[in-house]
Amino acid sequence: MLGIFSRIRRQLFLTNKVRRYVLYSIGEVLFSVLGILIANWLAKSEERNKQQIQEIRILNGIKESLAQDTLTLKPILKSIPL
């Protein structure tokens, strides 16, 4: 694939088609930047997913702890006269 791009670039440069060469170069840079932006977006979305999973685990732990505390305190509260 890289050989094809090198061949196109060489042909454009050697045939003195400067305008096309410049447009080709700009397009190549734009595709590179676009690829970097997509890779960055994917990495950030993966990191967000990991954080959400961790938050869900923490919230489940809090929920289980509250349930256990409720079971422990119910008999104590029933034994206290109002």
Image (cartoon, rainbow, N blue to C red):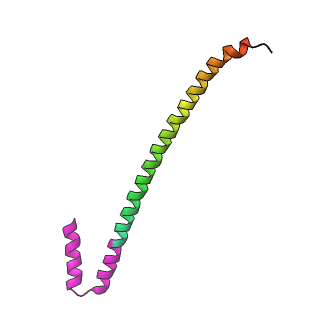
Query: Going 37% across and 71% down the picture, which residue do you hit?
Result: 30
Point out residue 26 in the picture as x, y percentages from the top left corner: 35, 76
Would residue 81 appear left or right of 67 to someone viewing this image?
right
Of the 4 image quadrants, the one containing the N terminus is bottom left
Check the image and report above or below for 28 versus 18: above
Point out residue 41 in the picture as x, y percentages from the top left corner: 43, 57
Point out residue 27 in the picture as x, y percentages from the top left corner: 35, 74
User: Among all residues in the image, which is located at the extreme right?
Assistant: 82
What is the magenta range?
A: 1-28
Q: In which quarter of the image is residue 39?
A: bottom left
Would residue 15 appear left or right of 55 to someone viewing this image?
left
Of the 4 image quadrants, the one containing the C terminus is top right
Dominant SS in magenta: helix
Check the image and report above or below for 74 versus 26: above
Query: Going 78% across and 13% down the picture, which residue do you hit?
Result: 81
Check the image and report above or below for 60 versus 9: above
Point out residue 60 in the picture as x, y percentages from the top left corner: 54, 31
Query: Going 40% across and 53% down the picture, which residue do you hit?
Result: 43
Q: Nearer the viewer, residue 76 or 34?
A: 76
Q: In which quarter of the image is residue 2?
A: bottom left
User: Among all residues in the image, which is located at the extreme bottom?
Assistant: 16
Q: Which of 25 and 49 is in front in this view?
A: 49
Q: Quadrant of residue 42?
A: bottom left
Q: Does the magenta stretch include residue 29?
A: no
Number of disc labels: 0
Query: Going 48% across and 44% down the picture, which residue do you hit?
Result: 51
Would residue 48 appear left or right of 26 to someone viewing this image?
right
